[in-house]
Amino acid sequence: MKKYIVLALALLVMGGVMAQEKQGSKRERKKNLVVKEWNQKQGSKTPYLDNVVTYDELGRKVEEIEYASYGQKKRVTYEYEGTGTKCKRQVEYDDKNHAVRIKKFEYNEDGTRKVQYNYKPNGKLESTKTFEYNYK
């Protein structure tokens, strides 16, 4: 019986290590990456830029820009604390590159989001979103 318990624990530990390696390798592939998405309308020979996502040297998303036919439609920047992977601040910009909303985040000890604070560009708190997790 003890052998089975030790074997089960070993498998759990190995699974956790493999999951971390897989996540790390995914982030590793995104280091300093810029992903451009192009669209092309049916019958047109000219593609147009639709979306650009930029990742930093740690593989974290730092900027996402959505385009329309007239140019930038929306831009979002992401800020992190130190080398952490949890976004602490997110700023949304409009088509004229003016900030329209600032989001700040708090996390639970297990890494899940706890609270999201939504601010207007002038710094006034607009709303708060609380996250609740019910595991079954």
Image: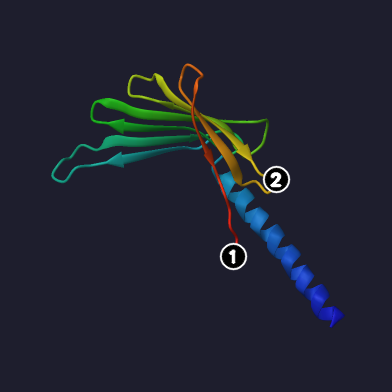
Residue 109 at x, y = what percent?
Answer: 70, 45
Q: Residues within 10 Å of mark 2 (few under 14, many from 20)?
A: few
- Height in image: 107 above or below 24? above
Judged by depth in the image, the label closer to the viewer, 2 or 1, is 1
Check disc 1 and report the residue beneath it: 136
User: What amino acid is at disc 1?
Assistant: Lys
Residue 96 at x, y = what percent?
Answer: 33, 19
- Where does the N terminus fall, quadrant-wise? bottom right
Residue in the foreground of this view, choosing between 2 and 40: 2
Residue 102 at x, y = what percent?
Answer: 49, 26
Q: Is residue 124 left or right of residue 18?
A: left
Check disc 2 and report the residue beneath it: 109
Q: Secondary structure at mark 2?
A: loop
Q: Residue at x 65, y 31 (%)?
A: 81
Which quadrant would residue 4 be assigned to in this image?
A: bottom right
User: What amino acid is at disc 2?
Assistant: Glu
Measured in 3D between alpha carbons, the distance from the residue under mark 2 to the one under mark 1, in whole angstroms, is: 19 Å
Q: Secondary structure at mark 1?
A: loop
- Where does the C terminus fall, quadrant-wise? bottom right
Label whose residue precedes the other's in the sequence (2 or 1): 2
